[in-house]
Image (cartoon, helix red, strand yellow):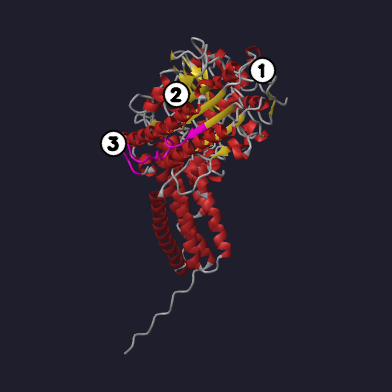
Amino acid sequence: MFRQQEPASPAPTRPALAQGLFRLWLLNVLAGTLVGSLWFFDAPADRAPWIRVYVSLALVSSVAVLALIPGAIYFGILRWVKHWRVACFLAGLAGAWFLAVLYTDTIVYRLLRYHFFDSAVLNVAFTEGSGDSIILGGYIWTTAALVITAITLAQTACAIYFVRRVQRLEAEGERPHFLLRPRTVVLVGFLPSLLFSQTVSAAADVAQNREALRAIQPIPVVPRVRLGQVLEPFLEPSEPRPPELDLLPENAKVNWPHEHPKLAADAPRRNVFICVLDSWRRDMYTPELTPNIHAFSKDARVFDDHLSGGNGTRYGLFTMMYGLHGSYWFPMLAERRAPVMIEALQEEGYDVRVFSSASMNFPEFRDTAWSTVPEANIVDEFPPEMVAWEKDELLSEAFEGWLETREARHDDRPFFTFVLLDAPHQPYTNPGGPYQPSVKELDYIQLGRTTKGPELRDLQLRVRNTYMNSVHHADASAGRFLEALERSGEADNTYMIVTGDHGEEFFECGFWGHTSSFSPEQVQVPFLFRGPGIDPGLETRPTSHLDVSNTLLELLGADPSIRADYSLGMDLLNPVEQRERVVAGWSDIGLWTDSGIFDLPLSAPGLGGWVEEIDCYDRQWNPLMDLAARCRAERKALEQMAVECVRFLDVPH
């Protein structure tokens, strides 16, 4: 006898499908909370119990808010997808992407201390040429594809199970459990968590409880109630609060320069050559590591206490070319303003040339520093399969060819040449080198999850050696540029600068790479200056990239008395004994002082995010708790920085 085939199960009702997907959404919130706990990898072990509860509830609230994105996708699936199994698969795919992006954000945060959702990351994603700066490698993409596929299949299976479970309850005439109903979850779970975390946040802001305010900084989207600002007029005058400084006023327009520098007619027209090694940090200038640059230094002035203008290429080069703090980047970019130094040189007939291994579209230097430079004078395009060290070699060949062409054409115009060698930038490409052991390819996932112990020390050694091999190769390329200048006979008539655009960190202060703090590893760079009338030797007084453009212009005949009308810099060749120095990042600005390194929020058009508190750190980037006292000690310097940040802006009243 043949067994009678059981009838196929009927398709679930839409309410059953909706309840099943709601349970999948809850599962993603719980899984997302576990993933989000990785944001707190360096949380102090001795936190007070109430702060632990506060952080936990704030984390749940934040993940639930982020999960509204896949929740909205689920709603669309319910409305437009007819076949329930297809709906379960699409919901599983949306959930997998949600968890993958969340995990990626924890990696980004552990590496750099900002979020995947930050506008800095969006700038990378949507700006042409960013691929030269951010190279993830095939391993990362393959791993991501496999993980998303596996999570999608697991979530699809869970969705089918949940839907079938609800379907069986419907058939038995039962309703979902009280705790699994949407109204209960919102009213009993998420709203109390949000209200509690916001109440604590408001109280901490009023009381200026630095421990509580810092505790939730790793969470990307939880709102911070700034009740202290609202109540400030009613607080006791003795209540210590840090100052509120508006360093980039909204809708401000550029008013720069106040007076344009002119080169004296009788001043000699020297050439200018600036060679920048990307990510070249201060302690990576040694006779063994950089022999060609060290040989160059014998006739140069070497600056031993020099800061870049920021912790990334955008701000390091901007400050060098413009003589302004990095806070001016956004207004200058919005108005496509060129540096007055370049304009002054072009007015005098200088041939301006740019040779770069990295695209000048990212950061947007074609729209800023080189906006008046003919496109034919910018060399930055290479075959896409080439890596940075190979581009550096081709770049030196292009420079040598250009010098030979000048000589053949008897072109006696003075020139300004800017060179950017990109090999030392992540992922530290090189053809091999003497520093071993090293890594073949940077594994950013490993960097993000390795935070202590022998594994960290081994990883630091191997990554650092890889970087040093890249610096060693960049030194060879820089040597070719310097040698070409000597062969051409132009060296003796050229002001030559060799420096870095910013530093690079290998988790000494808890970060990998750059753009994440204003620690010495990220902002201190070598700086060497050689040329007619520049005495060689060691300069130990504090200097900055801020001083470069005005110093060059004054050497070429500009009037030093009008320096303050177009620059915030000082004279590199006659530094002061002591000074506070400003450094910039994407959404903040730093002030190096004797009391510590201040980190202040910078509001800029389209930045988004939540305005953070002023903070102060020591040179190891440990937070200093007595902030109000340090603000009082450096009040004059903070006020001076605030004035400088708006000196060349027309601020609407």
In this image, 357 relative to 410: left or right?
A: left
**Residue 228's spot in the image, x, y percent?**
57, 25
Task: Pick whichever, 538 or 324, lies toward us.
Answer: 538
Tag shown at residue 565: 1
**Residue 234's spot in the image, x, y percent?**
61, 20
Residue type at tag 3? Gln
Q: Nearer the viewer, mark 2 or mark 3?
A: 3
The residue positioned 55% from the left and 39% from the top of the image is 379
Residue 436 magenta-highlighted: yes
Tag shown at residue 524: 2
Circles 1, 2 touching at the beta carbon (< 8 Å): no
User: Crowding near pointer 1: few (<14 within 10 Å), some, many (20+)?
Assistant: some
Say what secondary structure mark 1 lies in.
Answer: helix
Segment tinted magenta in the rendering: 419-440
- Mark nearer the N terminus (3 vs 1): 3
- Mark nearer the N terminus (2 vs 3): 3
User: Could you tell me if residue 517 is visible in this image?
Assistant: no
**Residue 519's spot in the image, x, y percent?**
43, 25
Residue type at tag 2? Gln
**Residue that extends furthest to the left in the rendered view of this protein:** 454
In this image, 640 relative to 382: left or right?
A: right
User: Could you tell me if residue 245 is visible in this image?
Assistant: yes
What is the quadrant of residue 338 in the picture? Answer: top right
What is the quadrant of residue 266 in the picture? Answer: top right
Q: Which residue is mark 3?
A: 436
Say what secondary structure mark 3 lies in.
Answer: loop
Alpha carbons under labels 2 and 3: distance apart: 25 Å
**Residue 55's spot in the image, x, y percent?**
44, 36
Alpha carbons under labels 3 and 1: distance apart: 50 Å
